[in-house]
Image: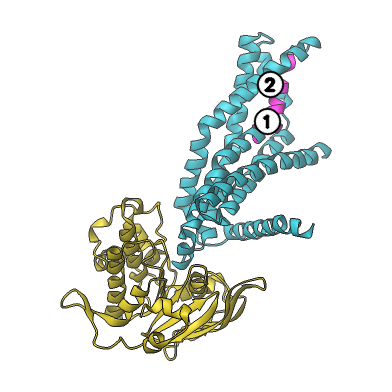
Amino acid sequence: MEQTDAGPILIFRNVSFGFDDNLVLRDVSFELTRGATLIIHGAAGSGKTVLLKIALGLLRPTSGRVILFGLDVTEYTEQQWFDVRSRIGVLFQEGGLFDSFSIEDNVGYPLVNQPLLQVPPEEVAPRVEQSLEFVELGHTLEKFPSELSGGMRRRVGIARAIVTQPELMLYDSPTAGLDPITANTIMALIVKGRDMRHATTLIVTHRHQDGEILERYRWDDSIGGLQKLEGVSAGTRYLVLEDGRIAFLGSPAEFDACNDPHVAQFSSR
Amino acid sequence: MLELLKAPILTFQEFVLLSGRAVRGIFRKPYYWDDVFLQMDLIGVGSLPVVILTGFFSGAVMALQMSRALQKYGATSQVGMIVAITLVREMGPVLTALMVAGRNSSGMASELGSMKVTEQIDAMRALGTDPIMKLVKPRLLATAFVLPLLTVLADFVGLVGGYLVACKMLHLTTSSEYWSSAWQAIEYDDIAQGLLKPFVFAIVLSLVGCHYGMRTKGGTQGVGRATTQAVVVASVWVVVLTFIIGRVFVTM
């Protein structure tokens, strides 16, 4: 596969999805540079998940272009997408774990099945363990998703997303339906993944706290936890969707200063 | 009017597209043989009790119902022939297919439907697997392999059921007469028809089950709806197809 390291990792150029009477995304354009974090806010039904699925090739935009890793992937076939997706890690809203597989098989699934990765069989188990250790769930290898709590399932989802060491991480409402303490644990893991692996991160959420954690904290490995930054972490940008349109796109400072009432409800300041 | 037709035509189009991809997939890698064998076990071994019971009693009922008519014409010695022909040509394939539709098309729709609504199918695509190859193809291959076998078994058990009623219960005929008339009545085209039908039914049953599962929308309620639709549509297809295939064989 062609590889282009220069320039933004993900570009949406006038992307729309849906039909005239029911447009879910309208003319959405943005760029995500390597190593940056994009936080997408929006109410339910504003098109957040659709945007994420388009970025992952699960849905094809009705119009506009999508450029990933420097390649125009808009017209890619499913087979071509498999190669692109091997460079992307994704956490689905409910974790998207396979019920019938053990946690070990769930986390090892992309290593075994991504055609481009070609991981030798003897390397699968150590990498799965390492990835589960990362989310502090090393003891759950033999368990099944139904035996874990909602928060633990989400953590396994993160372990599965990072096991392939992807360059781009997509998170779909990682804290939805979780209590605040568990939600913060999940966010800490996402910050840890971003800072320790320098992965480009796109996160879709409706909780303003999630954005604030990504923006103001960084992972400190010496203390094994989050540490507040003096300023804001560089490269963080906000995008707010309203009925499929971009209502706001800009830096944290601009986000704080925005007076638009719809945007302001996500900034909490 | 056009609005009314739009939804069923769209559904049919989706079904044809899925079928095309699944059938094309049969000739392409990858093959998930573990899944194929697992499905064979679920569909084949799992359906054995219900198929044996249905086959046995359909043969028995056939002998029972025909006894009076045959007595009227003094043709009770032909009971073996009647049971054999009706079972091999029609009742064996159709009843077996209906049982498997009720058991497995619904199972496929609910399993795949649950996977769809919990984003497992999306996750599968995101993690490098084509759901058609991983989920649909193994179910199609397994059903196409086991349904003809189940039908042969149902036919045989049905003949035994007919034998017990005709010879042991009603004493219509002797054992040797029953089995020889049954044996002589069946011709090669009956066997061809009796094996072609379950093969065609298997393709339709599995694809309908998978199709309704893969297009499930709207949470658990949607899963229930998909399951019901799969059974209804698969069953209707079975009776329509048996007529069409029967028509072809009758005119041949």
Residue A82 rendering spot, x and y as whole percentages: 49, 71
Q: Using the image, name the chain to which the residue with label 1 belongs.
A: B
Residue drawn at (40%, 89%), measured in percent from left and top?
A254
Residue drawn at (52%, 62%), measured in percent from left and top?
B29
* Residue B85 falls left or right of residue B251: left
Q: Circles 2 and 1: CB distance less than 8 Å?
A: yes
| Residue extending farthest bottom | A6
| Residue extending farthest left | A222
For the residue pair A177 and A98, the one nearer the viewer reads as A177
At mark 2, the secondary structure is helix
Q: Please, what is the three-letter code of the amino acid marked with disc 1?
A: Met
Query: Neighbour class for label 2 at 10 Å: few (<14), some, many (≥20)?
Result: many
Q: Using the image, name the chain to which the residue with label 2 belongs.
A: B
At mark 1, the secondary structure is helix
Instruction: Name the residue tied to disc 1.
Output: B91
Residue A73 rendering spot, x and y as whole percentages: 54, 79
Residue drawn at (80%, 39%), measured in percent from left and top?
B247
Q: Please, what is the three-letter code of the amino acid marked with disc 2?
A: Met
Chain A, which colour?
Answer: yellow
Chain B, which colour?
Answer: cyan
* Residue B62 badge: 2
> Does residue A224 belong to the magenta stretch?
no
Magenta stretch: helix, strand or loop mostly: helix
Q: In the picture, residue A78 is in which quadrant?
A: bottom right
The quarter of the picture where the N terminus of chain B appears is bottom right
Q: Is residue A75 visible?
A: no
For the residue pair A158 and B241, the one nearer the viewer reads as A158
In the rendered view, tell whether residue B56 sits above or below residue A258: above
Which residues fall within the magenta stretch? B77-93
Which of pointers 2 and 1 lies earlier in the amino acid sequence?
2
